[in-house]
Structures are given as C-alpha cells and as structure tokens.
C-alpha cells in the first residue's frame, strides 16, 4: 500500500516519502489566541489529528507542533479594550483552545510554543536574513526583501509581479517593494515591546512559524498544514524566510491545506454574527458527531454546515456507537451464535480510502458499510467474528477521532438501579411509569433494549 498526499505546491497527489525513514515532522499553524475558537478552526485541527492518527497507524512516529500566536494586533486590541496585559488575553484563550481540543477529542500536539517564547531565536533568524542580504532595517521595522527571493509565489502559484502589486499587504512608505513584509515592527505607543538589536518593538506574524520550525523540528519538515486562507501571504512568506535563512530547499515536503467552513452557504464572519464557537456547537451535537461530520466532508473542499447536516451526522454517530456497544456487550455476556463474518474487506476499503490523500468521506462510507453488514446479526456471530469486527470498528472510530465512551462505576450502578426499577414497573404492568423512565433515560442518551436475557442499556454520545 502506498500513501498518497495532495501537495498544494505541486497541485498533485504525490507518494508520501519522509525525510527520515519512519519519522514524520509535522507543523500546523495554530490560533491567534484573542477569542474563542470556532467550528472552522476545529475543522482544521480535527483533520490534522486524523492525519496524525493515520500516519501512526501506518507505522510512523509523528512529532507534531502547533504554535500559539500570542502577540498580534488582535491580542493587543483586546487587551487594551479590557485594560489588561496582552499576556492575560493570550493565556485565557490559549487555555480555552486546549479545552476545545480536549473536548473534540483532538490529541494535543507534542510541542505547543507561544510566539513570545522564541523571541531570542527570532533575533538570530532575522539578523541572519539581514546579513545574507534578504532583509533590511527601515525606519518602522525590519523587512524581508521579496525581490531577493526569486521563488517567491511558488506555493500560491501567483506571479511575483502580480503579488508585488500588494493588494492585501500592509502599506508602509519605508518598504523597498510593496510585497516586502515585516519581520520586526517598531514599537508603537501603548503596545508591548521587546528590546531587539535593531529597535524596540515586536515580531511580525510570519517569522514565528519559520523560527519555531527551525528551532524545534529542523531546517526541513515533512508536513506543513493550515487552513487554505493561510496559503497567501502567510505560507508564501514562511517559505521565503525559511529557505533564505537555511539555504535548504524545500523547507516543507508536503503542504496540506484544509478548506473553509460555511454556515448555511454563507461565510462565517463577525459582521454576519453567524460564528459558532466550539462550546455552542457541542450544545447542537456531541463531539463524536462533529468529528464524524467533519470526516464526511472532503478536507480540501469548502464545508457547508447546516442543521440538517449535523443532525444526520449525529444519527449516523448513534448507529455506530449502538453497534460498538452491542458488540462489546455480546462478547462480554457471551451472547453469541455460530455465524462467520470477516470485517477484513471493510478494513481494506477504509485503508485504501485513507491512503488516497486522507479521503475521509470514503473511509466513513466503509465504516457505515461495516455497520450495515453486521446490523441485526451481532448476537448471531461467533466469538472470533465478533471480536475481529469490534477491533476493526474501534480502529476506524479511533482514526476518525470518535472517542470510546467510558462509564464509571458509580454511573453504572445508578443506571442499573433505574433500569431494575423500570423492570419492576413492567412486571406489575404499570406501563405508564415504565415508559416514562424509558423516555427520561433516552433524553440523557441512555437507550434501552429489551431482549430475551433482560434489558440492556447503552450510553450513547
Ligand atoms: Zn504559520
């Protein structure tokens, strides 16, 4: 089996080959921590979590870094509005981001540095760029001179002349070229600053990613990810800085970008007021359903979130968990038959889809076919078949980030008691009471299944 990855820089799916055998160095641009993360951010981090899990399934050891942009116009603005330091804003929303990752069952990265933790290293990178003639000190900051880097535009595929018209670029009368971007910004009134060798001030945004990658992962990495809104200018500028600094090409082997997220066909924006922050989304459906919903959408395409869409994903999620829990229970209670079933075909299908540039919609289809295969037959399967099916199902769910449900002993005892009480009512033919208990439990995500061997209960997400 060959893993193929779509590389933004070539516009093609390429065979995945790492710099070092068996090891993957992976960097994903993290959040600017000035507000709560929304479901568009979660889409990106959930996807790269799936990438990491699949690479590990394929035997790679993955080192993943996500950065925290703690110093930025937005953190400063918010700090000034609230009359607190930028660091307080940055930490508040960094902790919020960590909560969001945990809540969505996104594994935390191996390294998660803040921009301000690598300021001294930035001095070195910037000074080296100045010494090599790629950067210059101007009155209002230190700039990267894009005219010294002929490859500029190779990621976004735009012509340099076009880029240099500078439509989306901060204006400054002190730049040599309109496309030049700030590595260091001169101190402004009311802004935090550091004592850099050139002038007091703060770092530009792009330099933090180049610096952290060099410091923590090395001169070249395997995968660099982010939302596709970062391709230009952010990632283009990272390439220019890093390759000019180290002289090594390519800085990144595979550039991977996740499509934007829309709500009911509209772009999410502050002005439209249609932002869905991560914890509000969890009131609509649990994290497992969001993970499945994300996976049902091809990562490079835009994803249109609708109420119907998340509801359908939630229904599918419940079907998946019902099957998983029934398998576990059937094995545990030895309530099995002699039917043979092999999940191997479905695992092969799932793996082929994942190996094809992380085609998660195709992988979800394989998962749902496995669910269909065994639907209604779980208690007829023999032990070996049931165990293999459960193991394959769990691997698929794990890959897609659907967490295993843990029920602690105390909760289990309480539910058992309530279910026993309902059974008593049923035996006394007090169906109004027993039905009321069933309905209340269902609202709490606890489903009852009355069978020959009594009532089973499943705690669904
Ligand atoms: Zn970045």
Image (cartoon, rainbow, N blue to C red):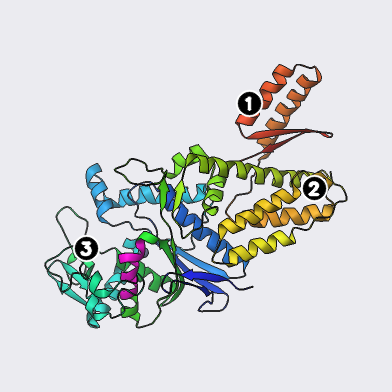
Q: Residue at x 34, y 55 (%)?
A: 32
User: Separation of disc 2 and disc 1 at Cα?
Assistant: 28 Å
Q: Residue at x 22, y 63 (%)?
A: 169
User: Separation of disc 2 and disc 3 at Cα?
Assistant: 63 Å
- The residue wearing badge 3 is 167
Assess whether residue 231 is covered by the magenta stretch: yes
At which x and y percent is residue 137?
16, 74
Circle nearer the viewer, 2 or 3:
3
* Among the two numbered marks 2 and 3 on one chain, the one whose residue lies closer to the N terminus: 3
Label 3 neighbour load within 10 Å: few <14, some 14-19, many 20+: few
Circle nearer the viewer, 1 or 3:
3
User: Separation of disc 1 and disc 3 at Cα?
Assistant: 58 Å
Residue 32 seen anywhere in this rendered image of the structure: yes
Q: Quadrant of the C terminus?
A: top right
Question: Image quarter for residue 180?
Answer: bottom left
Pick out the residue farthest to the front. Answer: 265
Q: Main secondary structure of the magenta part?
A: helix
Residue 118 seen anywhere in this rendered image of the structure: no
- The residue wearing badge 1 is 440
Instruction: Say whether residue 48 is left or right of residue 173.
Output: right
Q: Residue at x 56, y 61 (%)?
A: 359
- The residue wearing badge 2 is 331
Pick out the residue farthest to the right. Answer: 338
Assess whether residue 46 is covered by the magenta stretch: no
* Among the two numbered marks 1 and 3 on one chain, the one whose residue lies closer to the N terminus: 3
Secondary element under disc 1, as helix, strand or loop, is helix
Q: Which residues are magenta?
A: 230-240
At which x and y percent is residue 418?
70, 27
Q: Kindly tell me whether mark 3's CB lies below 8 Å from ligand 1.
A: no
Instruction: Say whether residue 238 is left or right of residue 40.
Output: left
Question: Image quarter for residue 22?
Answer: bottom right
At which x and y percent is residue 290?
52, 47
């Amino acid at each position: 089996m060959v893993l193929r990855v779509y590389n933004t820089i070539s516009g093609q799916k390429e065979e995945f080959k790492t710099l070092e055998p068996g090891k993957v160095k992976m960097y994903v641009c993290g959040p600017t921590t000035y507000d709560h993360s929304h479901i568009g951010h979660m889409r990106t981090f959930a996807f790269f979590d799936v990438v990491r899990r699949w690479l590990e399934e394929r035997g790679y050891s993955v080192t993943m870094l996500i950065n925290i942009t703690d110093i930025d116009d937005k953190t400063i603005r918010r700090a000034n509005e609230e009359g607190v330091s930028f660091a307080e804003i940055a930490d508040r929303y960094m902790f919020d981001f960590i909560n969001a990752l945990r809540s969505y069952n996104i594994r935390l990265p191996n390294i998660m540095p803040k921009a301000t933790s690598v300021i001294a290293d930035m001095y070195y990178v910037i000074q080296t760029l100045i010494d090599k003639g790629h950067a210059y000190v101007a009155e209002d900051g230190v700039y990267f001179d894009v005219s010294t880097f002929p490859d500029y535009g190779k990621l976004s595929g735009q012509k340099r002349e076009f880029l240099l018209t500078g439509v989306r670029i901060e204006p400054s009368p002190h730049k040599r070229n309109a496309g030049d971007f700030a590595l260091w910004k001169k101190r402004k009134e009311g802004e935090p600053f550091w004592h850099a060798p050139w002038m007091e001030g703060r770092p530009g945004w792009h330099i933090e990613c180049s610096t952290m990658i060099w410091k923590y992962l090395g001169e070249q990495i395997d995968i660099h990810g982010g939302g596709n809104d970062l391709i230009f200018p952010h990632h283009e500028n990272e390439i220019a800085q890093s390759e000019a600094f180290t002289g090594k090409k390519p800085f990144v082997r595979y550039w991977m970008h996740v499509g934007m997220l829309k709500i009911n066909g509209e772009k999410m924006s502050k002005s439209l007021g249609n932002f869905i922050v991560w914890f509000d989304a969890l009131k609509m459906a649990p994290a497992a359903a969001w993970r499945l919903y994300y996976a049902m959408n091809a990562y490079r395409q835009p994803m249109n979130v609708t109420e119907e869409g998340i509801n359908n994903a939630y229904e599918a999620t419940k079907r998946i968990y019902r099957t998983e829990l029934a398998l576990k229970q059937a094995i545990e209670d030895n309530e099995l038959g002699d039917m043979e079933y092999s999940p191997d075909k479905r695992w092969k299908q799932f793996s082929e889809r994942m190996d094809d540039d992380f085609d998660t919609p195709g992988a979800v289809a394989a998962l749902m076919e496995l669910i269909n295969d065994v639907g209604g037959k779980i208690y007829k399967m023999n032990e070996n078949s049931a165990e293999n099916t459960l193991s394959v199902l769990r691997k698929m769910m794990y890959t897609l980030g659907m967490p295993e449900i843990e029920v602690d002993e105390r909760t289990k005892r309480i539910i058992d008691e309530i279910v026993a009480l309902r059974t008593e009512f049923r035996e006394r033919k007090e169906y109004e009471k027993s039905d009321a208990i069933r309905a209340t439990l269902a609202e709490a995500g606890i489903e009852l299944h009355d069978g020959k061997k009594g009532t089973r209960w499943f705690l669904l997400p």
